[in-house]
Amino acid sequence: MKLNRIYNLQVQVGPYTKPEKGNTKGASSSQPYVSFATKYVNIKLPFTLEFTVRRENLATAQTANFKIYNLAPKTRDQIYKEWFDGWKYSGIQLSAGYKDNFIPIIFTGTVRQAYTQRTGRTNMVTEIEAYDGGFAQANSYSNIAFSPGASMKEVITRLNSDLIGAYPTPVIGNIPTIINQRASVYTGPTFNLLQKISPVGTNITIDNNQLKVLGNNDGFLVNETIFNINSSTGLLDVPIREGVFIKCKMLFEPRLTIGQIVRLTSEDLPQYNGDYPVQGLVHEGIISDAVNGPCTTTVSLYLGPGGVKYITGGVTLPS
């Protein structure tokens, strides 16, 4: 294998369950009918994978595009899904990394559409477009009553159970401690309710199937350490300033996540050196036994006033 990179792409496929109302994966009566894939396929080397995964601390769904070369016709037919079949729930998860080292999950979401077409004279390429959180955003619904005294974090955690479920627990940043003085009722699409109650300056996003409620400065440690971004850990070029962000292009680094605190050390632009929360990630490249190709991660860091605001308490990430 080239450069010791490996991957595992798991895709849920049909047959689908009988369409029904209500479910445990984020859909509800706001979506009249939902069907769930009942089987899955695992795709890994020696099949060549091209991928682009975009994850950002924004209210929009994360997106991913996968291209797999020369799958067997039966597998291609299983994966096929039309854009218009949004009521069919088909999950997808990509783990990628380096053999005998680490292979974390870098994308968890649902298939939007999947099809196969010929490229060149010999290659049959199966392309999958997916999004993370889009299904839950579109289909979740809540109708909850709270007694007086419920805090903002309690409300967010309870709404998250309708959006995603009990696990993984949401990552909630340094939001004000607001207590409901009266009984309150929350009724409507769950993601919209979360956006309405979130404090100004807070971003609501679903990242790797986990709700994150973070301000631009909020950050947390992973395994109680700060990840270093420098030339020895894969920094490829001079960091680029784009508005209030610094973008750092690295060798493929799948262990990073949104909200994680990193330490940038650049010899060329030391004025930007410091600790920052990760605001965006773009993983893209090719993993293949047959061909060599680039595989990179571009990290967006927030260069705003106030520095990093550490989130107190433990943070549990999906695994």
Image (spheres, helix red, strand yellow):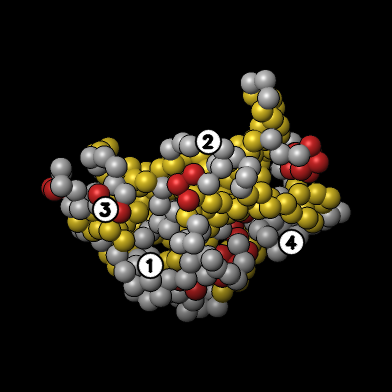
Residue, disc 1: 222
User: Which quarter of the figure is the C terminus placed in?
Assistant: bottom right
> Along the line of sight, which residue is nearer the eye, 144 or 267?
267
Q: Amino acid at mark 3?
A: Ser
The numbered disc on residue 232 is 3
Please report contact status of discs 2 and 4: CB closer than 8 Å, yes or no.
no
Residue, disc 4: 23
Please report contact status of discs 4 and 1: CB closer than 8 Å, yes or no.
no
- Where is residue 269 drawn, in percent x and y? 15, 44
> Badge 1: few (under 14), some or many (20 or more) residues near its Cα, within 10 Å?
some
Q: Tell me which numbered mark, 3 or 4, is placed earlier along the sequence.
A: 4
Please report contact status of discs 1 and 3: CB closer than 8 Å, yes or no.
no
Rendered image quadrant of residue 71 = top right
Q: Amino acid at mark 4?
A: Asn
The residues bearing labels 1 and 3 have C-alpha atoms spaced at a distance of: 20 Å
Q: Secondary structure at mark 4?
A: loop
> Along the line of sight, which residue is nearer the eye, 295 or 310?
295
Q: Amino acid at mark 1?
A: Val
Residue, disc 2: 291
- Where is residue 139 drawn, in percent x and y? 66, 52
- Where is residue 199 drawn, in percent x and y? 39, 59
Q: Secondary structure at mark 1?
A: loop
Q: Amino acid at mark 2?
A: Val
The residues bearing labels 2 and 4 have C-alpha atoms spaced at a distance of: 43 Å
Rendered image quadrant of residue 171 = bottom left
Q: Give the residue furthest to the left.
A: 271
Please report contact status of discs 1 and 2: CB closer than 8 Å, yes or no.
no
The residues bearing labels 3 and 2 have C-alpha atoms spaced at a distance of: 26 Å
Residue 177 shown left or right of residue 189 in the figure: left
